Image (tube, rainbow, N blue to C red):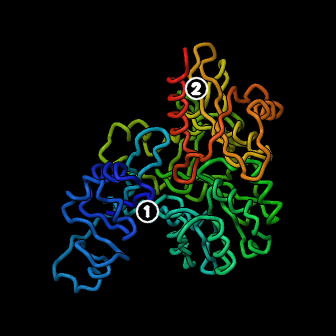
Amino acid sequence: MGVPLNYRYTASEIDRALAVSQASALIAHGGRERDLPGSRQVAELPRGLILYEAEAGRHPGLQDLIARSPAQRELPVPKASDPAFIFFTSGSTGPAKGVTHSREGVGWMFATYAAALELTADDVMLPGSSISHIGSFGFSFGALAAGARTLVAHGFDSQHMLELLRAQRPTVLWIQPMMLFQLVRDASARREDFRSLRLCRSGSDKVPAELARAFADLTGMVISEGMGMTEVGVVTATPSSARIKVGTIGQAAPGVRLSIRDEAGLELPAGAEGRLWISARGLATGYWSDPVATAAVMRDGWFDSGDVMKADEEGYLAFCGRKKQLIVHDGSNISPQEVEDALLQHEAVALAGVVGVPDLVHGENVHAYVALKPSAPVPTEQELIGFARARIGYKAPERVEFLTEMPLNAGKIDRAALKALAAKREAMAPR
């Protein structure tokens, strides 16, 4: 069983993942060796640490182990239901959970990825994020399963991604919104760089309207927005042969069933907002060693995503917010993504993150954090508040704070970190 770990993990995060998954060995790039002495769990692994692309040392090298003749012994034949991978969630709503996928489920997941993007042997897939995350993992191996070629980026900065676009001419690009922002805002990016693409898929967080406009202006293409989750892989899609409805995240991916339900679990009609429930052959079997967390979101083959959605008559879904992230101000639900979208329309704003801050009178107040573009004139807090209010009215933030660097988690705005920052500032404020 494999447990892909985020390459940005700190020693404490590595320790938690190793402890939860009950790992027996850790395979790591030689460049991470200097980070591992801070880990207590690595030293206690039954089969130790295995390095690759590292100088010869006290730890076994992966290439050396591969070169050895295998031991002549009978290996157990795994069952289709046996666990194949554990993927850890981003931890945006609490401690990261180990999402467990069976061997059979992973096979169905790859088939769904391939079918959702209509991948063929003629395609070249460029995943714009780490394969330790379910999105790039599924798109990469889904493409290989279809006979396509998959590119593995050494990094995800805009210059390296542009180099790959120019030299390798991918036909499909999967990239998260924050990274796509950096790509389209790169001064050296040209329309010709994107000519080979038949599809640009983005997701894992809402695609802001400003990003959609900037991408269309640069490339002449429309972003195909979709949804995926660690617990199920790809959920919705709009393939090249279908009509992209701007502002939606597409329709149910092949082999995926979707249901929008109220708090009582009853299915809602088209146009009504409710919780999105998901059923698929590639659905995870649960959270590793956590039956309580599993039972809280999985029932009769269905998974409660926690996302608030609505569907039109054609089955196209629109993202309305995450239940755990919605800000309740004076009894009204406010989606952080909608406020972020408004702030990103300002010419000086590079990134925006919005969270709710507890308030005795209003329930929660809208608190925004922004990172500015280096060359743009610096706006005032009140200017940004007024700018947002002109676009979204009462949903505009009560406060805006400026950050030199926006905290990100798996390529998305880390709202948990922003909430912690807001709580710390609130505790330090004079009474």
Residue 215 horizontal/vertical position (percent): 77, 59
User: Which residue occupies 54% across, 24% down?
Assistant: 426
Q: Which numbered disc covers residue 253?
A: none
Question: What's the residue at 66%, 39% (across, down)?
Answer: 402
Residue 140 can be seen in this image: yes
Q: Which residue is mark 2?
A: 357
User: Please, what secondary structure does the residue beneath circle 1 have?
Assistant: helix
- Mark 1 is on which residue type? Val
> Relative to 174, does residue 385 appear above or below in the rendering?
above
Quarter-wise, where is residue 298 in the image? top left
Residue 304: x and y in percent read 50, 40
Residue drawn at point x = 77 percent, y = 39 percent: 379
- Name of the residue lying farthest toward the left: 73
* Front residue (pair 357, 206): 357
Q: Residue sitting at 50 percent across and 66 percent down?
A: 110
Tell me residue 125's x, y (percent): 60, 72
Q: Is residue 194 above or below residue 13?
A: below
Q: Amino acid at mark 2?
A: Val
Q: Mark 1 to mark 2: distance in Å? A: 39 Å
Q: Secondary structure at mark 2?
A: strand
Quarter of the image for residue 56 reads: bottom left
Q: Which of marks 2 and 1 precedes in the sequence?
A: 1
On the image, numbered disc 1 is attached to which residue? 106
- Say left or right for 244 vs 108: right
**Looking at this view, is 190 or 311 the one in front?**
190
Instruction: Give coordinates of residue 80: x percent, y percent.
Output: 34, 63
Closer to us: mark 1 or mark 2? Answer: 2
**Mark 1 closeness class: few <14, some 14–19, many ≥20 residues within 10 Å:** many
- In this rendered view, identify the residue nearer to me: 369 or 430: 430
